[in-house]
Amino acid sequence: MLVLIVRFTIITALITGFLDIRPPAKETHGEVSASFGENNTALASYTVSEGYDYATRVLRDPWDMSEYTDINQWLNHTGPENYLLNIQVQDGIFSAYSSSGGSYFFALYPGYEPGMNNGKIGRILPINSSLYSCFYLAMQVQNPAAAYYQFTWGDASVVPSVWGMPYGLNLTNEIWKLYRVDLRTWPYISGTMWTARSAWQNLSVVPSLTGSTPFAIDWLRLTNCTPVYVNLSDLPANIYDLWLETTSPVHSIMALEGFTPQPNGSYAWDVQGIQPGTYTYSVKLTGSSNTIQQGQLTIVPTTIMNFTQPSPLSGPDFATSYSNPWDMDISDIVRIDCASWGIQNGILSIETLPPATIDPACIGDSANESDPRIFLNVPGFSYPSAFRYLSYSANIDGVWSAIEVGMIVRMFWILDYNGLPCYYVSRAISLDVGWYTYSADLYDPWNGYPETVFPTGCPVETWRDQDQVGPLILYDIEPNENVTDYTFYQDFDWFRLTMPDQVTQGQPFVVMLSINKPASQVRSVEYYYTNDLAQPMQHLAQRYITQPGPYITYLPLALSTYNSANPISSNIINFVWDTTGVSIGEYYICALAYDGYNQSLYCSESLVKVNG
Ligand SMILES: [Ca+2]
Ligand SMILES: [Ca+2]
Ligand SMILES: [Ca+2]
Ligand SMILES: [Ca+2]
């Protein structure tokens, strides 16, 4: 894990280095695209890049409160007296009611401690503290008694043993306000300073230290403190506030309080803490509703790139290689124990009774839990260790996830060790309520190490090294370990066990990216391949160009096969990589995009294996 943290620290440090190669005029100055009006009311329209934000750059998912996943991990595990109530994530706003002064949510959840490391968690994607240190929170609280909010950074534990917490963070009742804390200079810190550790895996927020407070959050950002300036002008000498008006939903946010323009009437407004979007801004005399100047501000979102090929879902799949993918038709199930189940429209639905009412033979001995098992069709004996990514699409009912009472999935594999069946139980993958796709890398030494091996005498080997034991006999998914007094309702759409994407040296490989904007808005993308994520631009990837000769028939064939499975849509970008001259090995693909305002660099999560 330490290696991973160091690696990601280096990556983020490297990525920030690219800021230096941006065209400077685009980096820090607003582009005025309309001239000032003829009367005294100055009207302007500014378009600028987005500030450099951790969640955007590293999680590939800004804390814009557009998705429940921005706040849902380990939600409400503080104990009933500390719960958030009336939780809503709607129209880009997260709102709830703080029942106590201890009600909090995780912006960055470190990960389920006994479980596998998977998803957008701090243990995989820690915050580089020397890079990201300007905290912004666009929030409204509605409680005259609420005086302070708070947030905490911490190490890789849910209840961190090393943590730090700024205090003295004043709230203003009723109004929407953009709160800002520079973590390098804020004078009041309890615990460990932000910069005392190179990385943090945990970031949680208490919207109000006073209970009984309704609150709403539009966004949270953690930037590198590099300003993105909008240069306002024509402001008579006075003290002003800056307000942002948004349309959907309509609200006004005080973005800056009490600023004084230069003697020449100009003011360099730093908008790095503002979520991308288009706003009307109003300059008002401070503390009044008297508008002096209005204009339009557009912050262009960073091009966020998600690799759909290569990805943990795109490589060769174990069950598919035997011509029957685990897409949940009846032939995929050998047997299901200790749960009632059915299959309809390619969805496996299962119900797990609580331990009080389930058949006693179905109760596990570790926590007296209800312990169902789904035995998947494993065609013949084989050696599946080359399949390193476990993925599945699952849904579980609930108000919020209850991991510690059994909302988990484990993998179980049985190997033939010279005639002795050996049983291997994986670590748990935690589930969230609702439909999600989960992926875990079983070659991660922590993820692949079995939690339990039995009987005695069976060699303890990781998933990766299972071939040293013997061939696979049975494979099952253990979908939950219910210790509650209620039934779990669960669905699975599919399971996959994939190996890295494969290509034969000299042949084309199609890289596919899904981006957060129309592809037409991206001016350029350069591609790289690397065997070291600390060097994302290790080798430039050459574009495959159709040539006379045997390849001329190959490429259209490959593309047409590809396109029929994945119709081209406007936010998908393809690149055909020419692997001629690429050394045999396994590589991540990285892409550097420029949209005219923002430069961004992202690498694939999984590998492409170039074979000889
Ligand atoms: Ca988001
Ligand atoms: Ca929002
Ligand atoms: Ca099937
Ligand atoms: Ca299905």
Image (tube, helix red, strand yellow):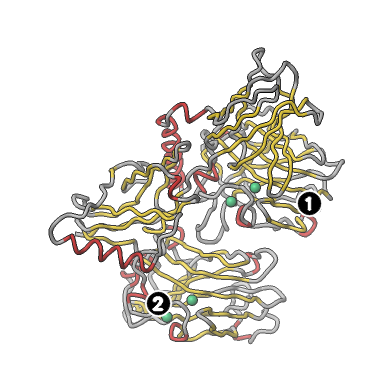
- Specify whether 259 is left or right of 549: right
Residue 157 lies, with reference to residue 338, above or below; the image says above
Ligand 2 within 8 Å of disc 1? The answer is no
* Residue at 76% in and 56% down: 83
Q: Earlier in the sequence, mark 1 or mark 2?
A: 1
Identify the disc placed on residue 98.
1
Q: Position of residue 25 (x, y in %)?
A: 47, 26
Q: Position of residue 467 (x, y in %)?
A: 31, 70
Q: Amino acid at mark 2?
A: Pro
Q: Amino acid at mark 1?
A: Ser
Identify the disc placed on residue 325.
2
* Mark 2 neighbour density, 10 Å: few (under 14) some (14–19) many (20 or more): some
Give the quarter of the image for residue 420. Answer: bottom left
Which quadrant does ligand 3 occupy? bottom left
* Residue at 48% in and 74% down: 494
Q: Nearer the viewer, residue 365 or 532?
A: 532
List the single residue furthest toward the right: 144
Q: Nearer the viewer, residue 358 or 245?
A: 245
Q: Secondary structure at mark 2?
A: loop
Ligand 3 within 8 Å of disc 2? The answer is yes
Identify the disc placed on residue 233.
none
Q: Position of residue 397 (x, y in %)?
A: 65, 71
Disc 1/disc 2 C-alpha distance (Å): 46 Å
Residue 461 lies, with reference to residue 250, above or below; the image says below
